[in-house]
Amino acid sequence: MLEKIKRAREIIKESDAVLITAGAGMGVDSGLPDFRGNEGFWRAYPPIKKLGLSFSEMASPHWFKTDPKLAWAFYGHRLHLYRDTTPHDGFKMLLDLVNDKNENYFIYTSNVDGQFQKAGFSEEKIVEVHGSIHFLQCSKDCQDRIWSADDLEIRVDMDRFEALDIPTCPNCESVVRPNILMFGDWYWNSRRTDVQNSLYRKWLKGTKKSLQKIAIIEIGAGTAIPTIRNLGNSLSSTYKQAYLIRINPRESEVENENSIGLELGGLEGLKAILE
């Protein structure tokens, strides 16, 4: 492990650019649930255990049509949880790192919690591949419109697990939903994420063109939904100047010689390679 940590530090020191990729495990040290398996999900939401619903079943757009009180109990509670959460010290370590690299960085995350923005990273340098709970859209996407959730307050009766406030679309009066990609989702408006992706691709193209060394620091990205892991695997295997540092306490396996796996938690791993 010590040799791997030493090599990771060398990769970061020698890098010209930093790509931070993060899954749900990034938020665990801030006190956020990662919904790992049904038991983990149900520990975070005991009322949903009584309903016998898994995370993938709960994270479905159909509830906004069939049971909006339940849908907004779940997403309203999460919205306020993320608003009230303070990003852990690892975010500050990463922010200091990218500042030392002349802000030559990008963030690619499957998290919808907005914690990177809250920690001070630039909105223009983040891809939220599954959207963000801090933005809203019509559940029917009637006007191809996305707007901020900053003024939204959702009261939740936690005993009955019902939302007491149901926001509706000002245009068609359908129930409003978070601008998050859910399971089996045909109405997610991807326009905001599409813009983020275009900025990322432009940054990556310029970085590759100038043959810069990229340190990919991946934190807490699991194999269940492998979007984040696939990005690091692909880039480190196709671009010789890209090196992946995978921080994961349970799934630290890597796929190519340009990769290092550290069997550590998010904050623990960041302290090991950045302090």
Image (cartoon, rainbow, N blue to C red):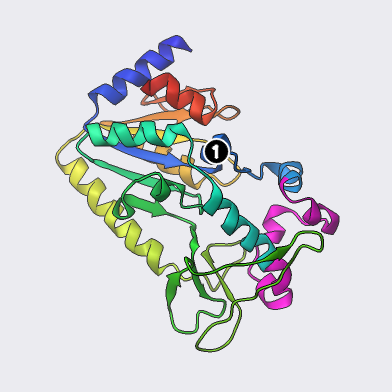
Q: Residue at x 69, y 70 (%)?
A: 63
121 or 111, which lies in front?
121
Left-right relation of 53 to 75: right
Q: Is residue 97 above or below residue 44?
A: above
Residue at the spot of label 1: 30
First to last magenta residue range: 44-71
- Whether residue 274 can be seen here: yes
Q: How many marks?
A: 1
Q: Is residue 137 above or below residue 241?
A: below
Residue 214, image x and y in percent?
27, 34
Q: Residue at x 69, y 53 (%)?
A: 55
Left-right relation of 49 to 139: right
Number of residues whose C-alpha sits closer than 10 Å to that of mark 1, classed few (under 14), some (14–19) or many (20 or more): some
Residue 249, image x and y in percent?
58, 27
Q: Main secondary structure of the magenta part?
A: helix
Q: Is residue 122 above or below residue 171?
A: above
Which picture quadrant has residue 211?
top left
- Whether residue 237 can be seen here: no
Left-right relation of 226 to 48: left
Q: Residue furthest top?
A: 2
Q: Residue at x 24, y 28 (%)?
A: 15
Q: Residue furthest left?
A: 210
Which picture quadrant has residue 140?
bottom right
Which picture quadrant has residue 64?
bottom right
Residue 12, image x and y in percent?
30, 25
Residue flagged by tag 1: what amino acid is it?
Ser
**Residue 75 falls within the magenta-colored stretch:** no
Q: Residue at x 47, y 71 (%)?
A: 189
